[in-house]
Amino acid sequence: MRHRRGSYLSTDTYGGLYLVHKFVLTPLLYLASVSFVLHTFHWAMLAVSVPV
């Protein structure tokens, strides 16, 4: 049975990279995005003193 090139079932290098991207890097991307939004909200709510 032949699997398409780049499939996680294929034996070439891209199959392993696909699995790493799908199960490790994608959740890290979502975590970084949520963290950025939460920190941006926190920074936006800080009081800034402006000298007169």
Image (tube, rainbow, N blue to C red):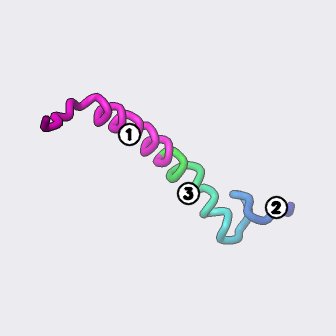
Q: Residues within 10 Å of mark 1 (few under 14, many from 20)?
A: few
Q: Are marks 1 and 3 in contact (CB under 8 Å)?
A: no
* Quarter that holds the C terminus: top left
At x 82%, y 61%, the residue is 4
Q: Nearer the viewer, residue 4 or 47?
A: 47
Q: Nearer the viewer, residue 2 or 36?
A: 36
Tell me if residue 40 is in the magenta stretch: yes
Q: Are marks 1 and 2 in contact (CB under 8 Å)?
A: no
Of mark 1 and mark 3, the one earlier in the sequence is 3
At x 78%, y 65%, the residue is 5
* Residue underneath mark 1: 35
Q: CA distance from mark 1 to mark 3?
A: 22 Å
Tell me where residue 11 appears, x and y as whole percent.
71, 68
Residue 17 placement, left or right of 44: right
Q: Are marks 2 and 3 in contact (CB under 8 Å)?
A: no
15 vs 32: above or below:
below
> In front: mark 1 or mark 3?
1
Tell me where residue 43 appears, x and y as whole percent.
29, 36
> Residue 4: which disc?
2
Residue 50 placement, left or right of 9: left
Single out the residue that lies furthest toward the left.
Answer: 51
* Residue underneath mark 3: 20
Tell me if residue 45 is in the magenta stretch: yes
Q: Nearer the viewer, residue 6 or 1?
A: 6
Of mark 1 and mark 2, the one earlier in the sequence is 2
Which amino acid type is marked by label 1? Ser
Q: Residues within 10 Å of mark 2 (few under 14, many from 20)?
A: few
Residue 22 placement, left or right of 5: left
Q: Which residues are magenta?
A: 28-52
Which amino acid type is marked by label 3? Val
